[in-house]
Amino acid sequence: MNAEQNERLTRITPGTPCGQLMRQYWQPAALVDEFNPAIDPRLKNRPVKAVTLLGQEMVLFKDASGDWGLLDRDCAHRGADLSFGRLGSLAEGGGLRCPFHGWKFAADGRCLETPAEPAGSKLCQHVKQRSYPVIEKSGALFAWLGDEGTAPPPLPAFDCFTAPASHSFAFKGLWNANWLQAFEVGIDPAHRSFLPRFLPDAPLGDIGQKASVRHVHGAGAHAIAGEPWPMARIMREFAQPDISFESTPWGMQLTALRPMTEQLTHVRVTNAIFPATFVMPLSETMTLTQMHVPVDDTHTYWYSFFTSFADPLDRESMRAQRQQFISLPDYIPKAGRHNAWGFIAQEQLMTPSLGLAEDAINVHDQWAVESMGAIQDRTREHLATSDKAIAANRRVLLNAIATVQAGGIAPGVADAAVAAQRTGPDTLDGIAPAANWAEWWQQAAQAKRDAAPWDAALATPSLSAADLLEAPVRYSPHEEAS
Ligand code: FES
């Protein structure tokens, strides 16, 4: 990859080609919890918050009538910071008033008052604060930063958006790095055998809502000849996955096979939802949908949406577990470059560990993402066969940027009828019969849906087993390197 391509893929501020692409999609702007007074008492009487998204400074607020508003932060009058604005009560007609000269704006950006102007002034009719659509979904507030005057697309009907609140939990954290290297960790099946390689094998069954951030590596009630095998052990002992991927209407479905015996193969199916989301199994009954949202070119919030297909989730417990490692109200990890991510060289020497916080899987991913630098210099890397999905995604991304620049529709963006058909996507982690792993995982995924206490049966497998078997992806890493 040359330097121009790397710039093209990573820069997302207004006016950049990738920035224009990213503005075709709904992006999480905040967790609903950030406005919960029990979690952040500062917002009890004044639900107003400064946010930065895609390099744009904005103010997010809930007005007196309960509507969410997202406005440019610089006041349309002379640019003062509206995040210091005063929320109007219902009796006052609502709105957000700039403290400088008292101009007041509605949640949709209409100018309501310009009190310093002469009586009878019609200035308000000619002024509008730029506003952005906001929808509340699955514990997050999603914003759409597309061109003014154009309509946002509907959200797809993915599991993370259709599961009831009782079976959903959302959390987030900040990484000091570019969005693309954050996303590329998620579509890198090979690193699972290395980065968290020496995490302790969590007890089988210690999974789901009570599992800590270690859960990723305790998932799955796997057994070979009656002996239980936690996922961490499988990842550790079978470190050369056979990776393949298929294009889907939303992005890419990745399959990593780890042949174990002549009869058994470990199968891990995950999904990349274009442009910056991956969906992976955490256990037999829970999936993680993780979105990577650019704050600016060198900072990224990951938003994790947990979806249970079995028991309701104990959200208080899940939040408390994560707050051990991440400080609110800005969701900043306690480990980072400032303290070498908690690295202890002696521990690495004395035990088969990475020398990082062993209970915090996110710290491992955070180290991988941040240690590359604020924006990874991809002119210096050497992609390998195990990076085939990452290389393919970059090609899709470059093509998508070109498509949008030419006035076309971004991948995965669909009208209401098609968006409603974007369901699932299915994920799975398990040990399959080697001879028919493709049929096995599809059946197992469907069984999970059928057993869900909420209506998860809408989704149908995106690919047939025959598709998976008959259309292996051929890829040469040299294509990308050239
Ligand atoms: S700058 Fe906001 S009212 Fe004047």
Image (spheres, rainbow, N blue to C red):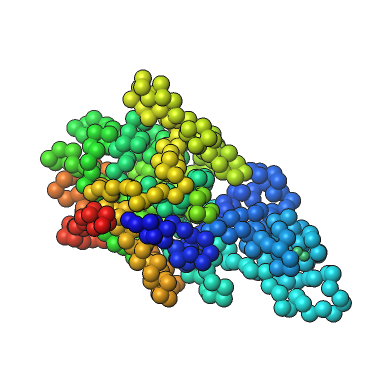
* Ligand 1 image position (quadrant): bottom right
How many marks are shown on the rendered structure? 0
Taking the view exactly as shown, the residue that stands out farthest to the left is: 262
- Residue 401, how many percent across, how many down? 40, 66
- Residue 62, how many percent across, how many down? 67, 59
**Residue at horizontal 41%, vertical 43%?**
372
Q: Nearer the viewer, residue 266 or 373?
A: 373
**Residue at horizontal 21%, vertical 34%?**
224
Q: Is residue 184 left or right of residue 233?
A: right
**Residue at horizontal 67%, vertical 69%?**
129
Q: Nearer the viewer, residue 179 or 249?
A: 179
Quarter that holds the N terminus: bottom left
Quarter that holds the C terminus: bottom left
Q: Quadrant of residue 352?
A: top left
**Residue at horizontal 73%, vertical 71%?**
111
322 over 347 or under it: above or below: below
Q: Nearer the viewer, residue 412 or 463?
A: 412
- Residue 431, how many percent across, how many down? 23, 42
Q: Quadrant of residue 135?
A: bottom right
Q: Is residue 309 left or right of residue 339?
A: left
From this viewpoint, is residue 341 visible? yes
- Residue 102, how many percent across, how many down? 80, 64
Q: Is residue 114 left or right of residue 299?
A: right
